[in-house]
Image (cartoon, coloured by chain):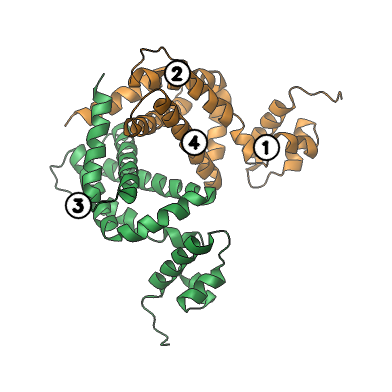
Chain colours: A orange, B green
Protein backbone atom coordinates (compact mmCIF):
# COMPACT_ATOMS: atom_id res chain seq x y z
CA UNK A 1 0.00 0.00 0.00
CA UNK A 2 1.46 3.35 -0.98
CA UNK A 3 1.97 5.91 1.77
CA UNK A 4 0.02 8.47 -0.26
CA UNK A 5 -3.65 7.64 0.04
CA UNK A 6 -5.57 10.56 -1.42
CA UNK A 7 -8.88 8.84 -0.79
CA UNK A 8 -8.36 7.52 2.72
CA UNK A 9 -10.73 10.16 4.08
CA UNK A 10 -13.56 8.95 1.85
CA UNK A 11 -12.77 5.32 2.48
CA UNK A 12 -13.00 5.92 6.21
CA UNK A 13 -16.31 7.74 5.83
CA UNK A 14 -17.75 4.92 3.72
CA UNK A 15 -16.49 2.23 6.08
CA UNK A 16 -17.88 4.07 9.12
CA UNK A 17 -21.32 4.51 7.57
CA UNK A 18 -21.41 0.84 6.56
CA UNK A 19 -20.54 -0.34 10.04
CA UNK A 20 -22.86 2.09 11.83
CA UNK A 21 -25.72 0.77 9.68
CA UNK A 22 -24.74 -2.88 10.05
CA UNK A 23 -24.03 -3.09 13.75
CA UNK A 24 -25.02 0.26 15.22
CA UNK A 25 -23.05 3.37 16.08
CA UNK A 26 -22.50 2.48 19.74
CA UNK A 27 -21.14 -0.98 18.96
CA UNK A 28 -18.65 0.22 16.35
CA UNK A 29 -15.08 1.04 17.32
CA UNK A 30 -12.59 3.25 15.51
CA UNK A 31 -10.42 0.15 15.14
CA UNK A 32 -13.21 -1.63 13.27
CA UNK A 33 -13.76 1.36 10.98
CA UNK A 34 -10.07 1.58 10.16
CA UNK A 35 -9.91 -2.16 9.51
CA UNK A 36 -12.92 -2.11 7.21
CA UNK A 37 -11.29 0.74 5.27
CA UNK A 38 -7.99 -1.15 5.11
CA UNK A 39 -6.24 1.62 7.02
CA UNK A 40 -4.73 2.11 10.46
CA UNK A 41 -6.30 3.75 13.49
CA UNK A 42 -3.54 6.33 13.27
CA UNK A 43 -4.74 7.29 9.81
CA UNK A 44 -8.29 7.52 11.14
CA UNK A 45 -7.23 9.96 13.83
CA UNK A 46 -5.30 12.01 11.30
CA UNK A 47 -8.61 12.73 9.60
CA UNK A 48 -11.21 12.68 12.37
CA UNK A 49 -11.28 13.47 16.08
CA UNK A 50 -13.52 10.50 16.90
CA UNK A 51 -16.11 8.13 15.48
CA UNK A 52 -18.81 10.76 15.76
CA UNK A 53 -16.98 13.36 13.68
CA UNK A 54 -16.75 11.03 10.66
CA UNK A 55 -20.44 11.71 10.18
CA UNK A 56 -19.88 15.47 10.16
CA UNK A 57 -16.81 15.61 7.97
CA UNK A 58 -18.35 17.93 5.35
CA UNK A 59 -19.82 20.42 7.76
CA UNK A 60 -17.07 23.04 7.53
CA UNK A 61 -16.73 22.85 3.75
CA UNK A 62 -20.47 23.30 3.34
CA UNK A 63 -20.53 26.24 5.71
CA UNK A 64 -17.76 27.88 3.71
CA UNK A 65 -19.67 27.34 0.45
CA UNK A 66 -22.71 28.93 2.07
CA UNK A 67 -20.79 31.98 3.24
CA UNK A 68 -18.86 32.36 -0.04
CA UNK A 69 -22.06 32.23 -2.07
CA UNK A 70 -23.57 35.06 -0.03
CA UNK A 71 -20.37 37.05 -0.26
CA UNK A 72 -20.16 36.61 -4.04
CA UNK A 73 -23.80 37.32 -4.84
CA UNK A 74 -24.42 40.30 -7.17
CA UNK A 75 -24.07 43.73 -5.60
CA UNK A 76 -27.73 44.51 -6.25
CA UNK A 77 -28.99 41.34 -4.48
CA UNK A 78 -31.56 42.02 -1.76
CA UNK A 79 -31.84 40.04 1.46
CA UNK A 80 -33.97 37.32 -0.08
CA UNK A 81 -31.65 36.89 -3.09
CA UNK A 82 -28.66 36.65 -0.74
CA UNK A 83 -30.34 33.92 1.27
CA UNK A 84 -31.31 32.09 -1.92
CA UNK A 85 -27.72 32.24 -3.16
CA UNK A 86 -26.44 30.74 0.08
CA UNK A 87 -29.02 27.96 0.23
CA UNK A 88 -28.50 27.24 -3.47
CA UNK A 89 -24.80 26.64 -2.92
CA UNK A 90 -25.47 24.16 -0.10
CA UNK A 91 -28.17 22.42 -2.14
CA UNK A 92 -25.71 22.00 -5.04
CA UNK A 93 -23.28 20.27 -2.69
CA UNK A 94 -25.89 18.02 -1.08
CA UNK A 95 -27.70 16.90 -4.24
CA UNK A 96 -24.96 14.54 -5.54
CA UNK A 97 -24.62 13.02 -2.06
CA UNK A 98 -28.21 11.87 -1.81
CA UNK A 99 -27.51 8.16 -1.42
CA UNK A 100 -24.92 8.75 1.30
CA UNK A 101 -27.23 11.18 3.11
CA UNK A 102 -30.13 8.72 2.95
CA UNK A 103 -27.98 6.08 4.60
CA UNK A 104 -26.64 8.55 7.14
CA UNK A 105 -30.08 9.70 8.29
CA UNK A 106 -31.14 6.62 10.32
CA UNK A 107 -27.72 6.55 11.98
CA UNK A 108 -28.14 10.14 13.16
CA UNK A 109 -31.70 9.46 14.29
CA UNK A 110 -30.60 6.42 16.30
CA UNK A 111 -28.49 8.27 18.88
CA UNK A 112 -29.33 11.37 20.92
CA UNK A 113 -25.66 12.40 20.91
CA UNK A 114 -25.67 12.36 17.10
CA UNK A 115 -28.92 14.30 16.95
CA UNK A 116 -27.40 16.90 19.28
CA UNK A 117 -24.37 17.13 17.04
CA UNK A 118 -26.58 17.48 13.96
CA UNK A 119 -28.46 20.34 15.63
CA UNK A 120 -25.13 22.01 16.42
CA UNK A 121 -24.19 21.74 12.75
CA UNK A 122 -27.39 23.47 11.71
CA UNK A 123 -26.86 26.12 14.40
CA UNK A 124 -23.35 26.73 13.11
CA UNK A 125 -24.65 27.15 9.56
CA UNK A 126 -27.35 29.51 10.84
CA UNK A 127 -24.74 31.61 12.62
CA UNK A 128 -22.48 31.66 9.57
CA UNK A 129 -25.33 32.68 7.28
CA UNK A 130 -26.38 35.37 9.74
CA UNK A 131 -22.86 36.80 9.76
CA UNK A 132 -22.60 36.69 5.98
CA UNK A 133 -25.91 38.53 5.61
CA UNK A 134 -24.78 41.20 8.06
CA UNK A 135 -21.54 41.57 6.10
CA UNK A 136 -23.68 42.24 3.06
CA UNK A 137 -25.47 45.04 4.87
CA UNK A 138 -28.52 43.35 6.37
CA UNK A 139 -29.81 44.75 9.66
CA UNK A 140 -28.78 42.43 12.53
CA UNK A 141 -32.35 41.45 13.43
CA UNK A 142 -33.25 40.74 9.81
CA UNK A 143 -30.06 38.74 9.31
CA UNK A 144 -30.76 36.62 12.39
CA UNK A 145 -34.37 35.86 11.51
CA UNK A 146 -33.70 35.28 7.81
CA UNK A 147 -30.83 32.93 8.56
CA UNK A 148 -32.78 30.96 11.13
CA UNK A 149 -35.80 30.66 8.90
CA UNK A 150 -33.71 29.69 5.85
CA UNK A 151 -31.77 26.95 7.61
CA UNK A 152 -35.06 25.72 9.07
CA UNK A 153 -36.50 25.49 5.56
CA UNK A 154 -33.38 23.72 4.30
CA UNK A 155 -33.52 21.25 7.16
CA UNK A 156 -37.21 20.37 6.65
CA UNK A 157 -36.73 20.17 2.87
CA UNK A 158 -33.70 17.89 3.23
CA UNK A 159 -35.57 15.59 5.63
CA UNK A 160 -38.43 15.22 3.14
CA UNK A 161 -36.02 14.77 0.23
CA UNK A 162 -34.14 12.01 2.04
CA UNK A 163 -37.25 9.91 2.62
CA UNK A 164 -38.91 10.65 -0.74
CA UNK A 165 -39.05 7.73 -3.16
CA UNK A 166 -38.68 9.62 -6.45
CA UNK A 167 -35.77 11.47 -7.99
CA UNK A 168 -37.07 14.96 -7.40
CA UNK A 169 -34.26 17.41 -6.76
CA UNK A 170 -33.55 18.84 -3.33
CA UNK A 171 -33.87 22.30 -4.88
CA UNK A 172 -37.53 21.55 -5.67
CA UNK A 173 -38.16 20.50 -2.08
CA UNK A 174 -36.55 23.69 -0.78
CA UNK A 175 -38.67 25.79 -3.09
CA UNK A 176 -41.86 24.02 -2.04
CA UNK A 177 -41.14 24.16 1.70
CA UNK A 178 -40.27 27.83 1.38
CA UNK A 179 -43.58 28.50 -0.39
CA UNK A 180 -45.47 26.49 2.25
CA UNK A 181 -43.90 28.47 5.07
CA UNK A 182 -44.74 31.76 3.41
CA UNK A 183 -48.31 30.61 2.89
CA UNK A 184 -48.60 29.46 6.51
CA UNK A 185 -47.27 32.72 7.90
CA UNK A 186 -49.14 34.88 5.42
CA UNK A 187 -52.60 33.45 6.01
CA UNK A 188 -53.38 35.69 8.97
CA UNK B 1 -32.33 20.42 59.36
CA UNK B 2 -35.66 18.69 58.89
CA UNK B 3 -35.79 15.64 56.71
CA UNK B 4 -38.58 17.19 54.66
CA UNK B 5 -37.05 19.79 52.35
CA UNK B 6 -39.73 20.77 49.88
CA UNK B 7 -37.48 23.35 48.26
CA UNK B 8 -34.28 21.34 47.88
CA UNK B 9 -34.76 21.19 44.13
CA UNK B 10 -34.83 24.98 43.87
CA UNK B 11 -31.97 25.41 46.31
CA UNK B 12 -29.84 23.09 44.20
CA UNK B 13 -30.74 24.97 41.04
CA UNK B 14 -29.86 28.31 42.63
CA UNK B 15 -26.60 27.00 44.06
CA UNK B 16 -25.59 25.47 40.74
CA UNK B 17 -26.26 28.65 38.79
CA UNK B 18 -24.32 30.71 41.36
CA UNK B 19 -21.31 28.43 41.16
CA UNK B 20 -21.37 28.08 37.38
CA UNK B 21 -21.31 31.87 37.14
CA UNK B 22 -18.65 32.33 39.82
CA UNK B 23 -16.15 29.67 38.84
CA UNK B 24 -17.35 28.24 35.55
CA UNK B 25 -19.39 25.17 34.65
CA UNK B 26 -16.39 22.92 34.00
CA UNK B 27 -14.73 23.72 37.32
CA UNK B 28 -17.83 23.10 39.41
CA UNK B 29 -18.48 19.69 40.93
CA UNK B 30 -21.76 18.20 42.08
CA UNK B 31 -20.25 18.04 45.56
CA UNK B 32 -19.67 21.81 45.52
CA UNK B 33 -23.23 22.46 44.35
CA UNK B 34 -24.67 20.25 47.08
CA UNK B 35 -22.48 21.92 49.69
CA UNK B 36 -23.47 25.42 48.60
CA UNK B 37 -27.13 24.38 48.83
CA UNK B 38 -26.56 22.87 52.27
CA UNK B 39 -27.59 19.45 51.00
CA UNK B 40 -25.92 16.13 50.26
CA UNK B 41 -24.74 14.79 46.91
CA UNK B 42 -27.26 12.02 47.34
CA UNK B 43 -30.05 14.59 47.44
CA UNK B 44 -28.61 16.20 44.33
CA UNK B 45 -28.74 12.93 42.44
CA UNK B 46 -32.29 12.33 43.63
CA UNK B 47 -33.29 15.43 41.67
CA UNK B 48 -30.87 15.61 38.74
CA UNK B 49 -28.94 13.11 36.63
CA UNK B 50 -25.81 15.30 36.52
CA UNK B 51 -24.55 18.86 36.79
CA UNK B 52 -25.71 19.63 33.26
CA UNK B 53 -29.31 18.62 33.85
CA UNK B 54 -29.75 21.14 36.68
CA UNK B 55 -29.81 23.78 33.96
CA UNK B 56 -32.60 22.00 32.10
CA UNK B 57 -34.79 21.10 35.03
CA UNK B 58 -37.89 22.88 33.73
CA UNK B 59 -37.76 21.53 30.21
CA UNK B 60 -40.31 18.75 30.61
CA UNK B 61 -42.79 20.82 32.57
CA UNK B 62 -42.64 23.57 29.95
CA UNK B 63 -43.12 21.10 27.14
CA UNK B 64 -46.18 19.73 28.90
CA UNK B 65 -47.61 23.23 29.32
CA UNK B 66 -47.05 23.83 25.61
CA UNK B 67 -48.82 20.63 24.59
CA UNK B 68 -51.67 21.08 27.08
CA UNK B 69 -52.32 24.62 25.87
CA UNK B 70 -52.65 23.42 22.26
CA UNK B 71 -54.85 20.53 23.35
CA UNK B 72 -57.12 22.82 25.38
CA UNK B 73 -57.46 25.62 22.83
CA UNK B 74 -61.04 26.32 21.64
CA UNK B 75 -62.47 23.85 19.14
CA UNK B 76 -62.74 26.54 16.48
CA UNK B 77 -59.05 27.58 16.77
CA UNK B 78 -57.19 27.52 13.45
CA UNK B 79 -53.55 26.55 13.05
CA UNK B 80 -52.25 29.98 13.91
CA UNK B 81 -54.43 30.28 17.01
CA UNK B 82 -53.28 26.85 18.19
CA UNK B 83 -49.64 27.87 17.82
CA UNK B 84 -50.30 31.14 19.62
CA UNK B 85 -51.94 29.28 22.49
CA UNK B 86 -48.94 26.99 22.85
CA UNK B 87 -46.36 29.78 22.71
CA UNK B 88 -48.45 31.88 25.08
CA UNK B 89 -48.38 29.15 27.72
CA UNK B 90 -44.59 28.87 27.53
CA UNK B 91 -44.19 32.64 27.63
CA UNK B 92 -46.35 32.79 30.78
CA UNK B 93 -44.01 30.30 32.46
CA UNK B 94 -40.81 32.03 31.34
CA UNK B 95 -41.79 35.61 32.15
CA UNK B 96 -41.54 35.34 35.99
CA UNK B 97 -38.17 33.58 35.64
CA UNK B 98 -36.47 36.41 33.76
CA UNK B 99 -33.71 37.04 36.27
CA UNK B 100 -32.79 33.38 36.52
CA UNK B 101 -32.85 33.02 32.72
CA UNK B 102 -30.63 36.07 32.29
CA UNK B 103 -28.06 34.55 34.61
CA UNK B 104 -28.38 31.16 32.96
CA UNK B 105 -27.75 32.46 29.44
CA UNK B 106 -23.97 33.15 29.70
CA UNK B 107 -23.46 29.75 31.34
CA UNK B 108 -25.14 28.01 28.42
CA UNK B 109 -23.19 30.11 25.91
CA UNK B 110 -19.89 29.26 27.62
CA UNK B 111 -19.89 25.52 26.84
CA UNK B 112 -20.55 23.75 23.54
CA UNK B 113 -22.02 20.77 25.41
CA UNK B 114 -24.55 23.07 27.07
CA UNK B 115 -25.39 24.75 23.77
CA UNK B 116 -25.97 21.31 22.24
CA UNK B 117 -28.24 20.43 25.12
CA UNK B 118 -30.14 23.70 24.74
CA UNK B 119 -30.68 22.98 21.05
CA UNK B 120 -31.97 19.52 21.94
CA UNK B 121 -34.42 21.15 24.33
CA UNK B 122 -35.75 23.40 21.58
CA UNK B 123 -35.92 20.43 19.20
CA UNK B 124 -37.92 18.49 21.75
CA UNK B 125 -40.35 21.39 22.16
CA UNK B 126 -40.64 21.65 18.37
CA UNK B 127 -41.45 17.95 18.10
CA UNK B 128 -43.98 18.15 20.91
CA UNK B 129 -45.69 21.17 19.36
CA UNK B 130 -45.72 19.44 15.97
CA UNK B 131 -47.41 16.39 17.50
CA UNK B 132 -49.94 18.52 19.38
CA UNK B 133 -50.85 20.42 16.20
CA UNK B 134 -51.31 17.16 14.31
CA UNK B 135 -53.53 15.88 17.12
CA UNK B 136 -55.66 18.96 16.57
CA UNK B 137 -56.06 18.09 12.91
CA UNK B 138 -53.24 20.03 11.21
CA UNK B 139 -51.76 18.43 8.09
CA UNK B 140 -48.38 16.84 8.93
CA UNK B 141 -46.36 19.20 6.73
CA UNK B 142 -48.14 22.27 8.10
CA UNK B 143 -47.69 21.04 11.66
CA UNK B 144 -43.95 20.49 11.13
CA UNK B 145 -43.31 23.87 9.52
CA UNK B 146 -45.52 25.82 11.92
CA UNK B 147 -43.90 24.21 14.94
CA UNK B 148 -40.37 24.80 13.69
CA UNK B 149 -41.10 28.39 12.80
CA UNK B 150 -42.87 29.07 16.09
CA UNK B 151 -40.12 27.68 18.29
CA UNK B 152 -37.62 29.61 16.17
CA UNK B 153 -39.55 32.81 16.84
CA UNK B 154 -39.74 32.00 20.56
CA UNK B 155 -36.02 31.34 20.70
CA UNK B 156 -35.02 34.57 18.95
CA UNK B 157 -37.52 36.56 21.03
CA UNK B 158 -36.25 35.03 24.28
CA UNK B 159 -32.64 35.80 23.36
CA UNK B 160 -33.51 39.44 22.72
CA UNK B 161 -35.61 39.64 25.87
CA UNK B 162 -32.81 38.26 28.01
CA UNK B 163 -30.30 40.89 26.90
CA UNK B 164 -32.78 43.79 26.80
CA UNK B 165 -32.31 46.42 29.48
CA UNK B 166 -35.95 47.44 30.02
CA UNK B 167 -38.86 45.61 31.56
CA UNK B 168 -40.70 44.89 28.33
CA UNK B 169 -42.56 41.59 28.48
CA UNK B 170 -41.39 38.51 26.65
CA UNK B 171 -44.83 38.37 25.04
CA UNK B 172 -44.12 41.71 23.34
CA UNK B 173 -40.81 40.41 22.00
CA UNK B 174 -42.52 37.29 20.62
CA UNK B 175 -45.17 39.40 18.93
CA UNK B 176 -42.56 41.69 17.37
CA UNK B 177 -40.27 38.90 16.17
CA UNK B 178 -43.26 37.10 14.70
CA UNK B 179 -44.29 40.25 12.82
CA UNK B 180 -40.72 40.76 11.60
CA UNK B 181 -40.52 37.23 10.27
CA UNK B 182 -43.82 37.59 8.45
CA UNK B 183 -42.66 40.88 6.94
CA UNK B 184 -39.33 39.36 5.86
CA UNK B 185 -40.97 36.36 4.23
CA UNK B 186 -43.80 38.34 2.74
CA UNK B 187 -41.71 41.01 1.00
CA UNK B 188 -41.13 38.96 -2.17
Q: Nearer the viewer, mark 3 or mark 4?
A: 4
Task: Say which mark, if any, is on residue A88.
Answer: 2
- Secondary structure at badge 1 equals helix
Q: Are marks 3 and 4 in contact (CB under 8 Å)?
A: no
- The residue closer to the viewer here, B122 or B34, is B34
Q: CA distance from mark 1 to mark 4?
A: 27 Å
Specify the subunit that label 2 lies on: A
| Residues flagged by tags 2 and 3 on a common chain | no
Residue at (45, 17) in percent of width and height = A169
Q: Position of residue B32 (x, y in %)?
A: 54, 71
Q: Nearer the viewer, mark 1 or mark 4?
A: 4
Specify the subunit that label 4 lies on: A
- The residue closer to the viewer here, A134 or A17, is A134
Q: Residues within 10 Å of mark 3 (few under 14, many from 20)?
A: few
Q: CA distance from mark 2 to mark 4?
A: 17 Å
Q: Nearer the viewer, mark 2 or mark 3?
A: 2
Q: Could you tell which of marks 2 and 4 lies nearer the N-terminus?
A: 2
Residue at (31, 60) in percent of width and height = B97
Q: CA distance from mark 1 to mark 3?
A: 46 Å
Q: Position of residue A81 (x, y in %)?
A: 36, 17
The number of discs equals: 4
Task: Say which mark, if any, is on residue B72.
Answer: 3
Residue A88, picture quadrant? top left
Task: Say which mark, if any, is on residue A19.
Answer: 1
Amino acid sequence: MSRWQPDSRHRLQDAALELYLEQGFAATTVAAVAERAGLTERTFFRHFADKREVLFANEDALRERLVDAVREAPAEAGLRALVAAGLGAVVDELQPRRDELRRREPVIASQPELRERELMKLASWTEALEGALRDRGAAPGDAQLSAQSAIGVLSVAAQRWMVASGDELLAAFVERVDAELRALLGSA
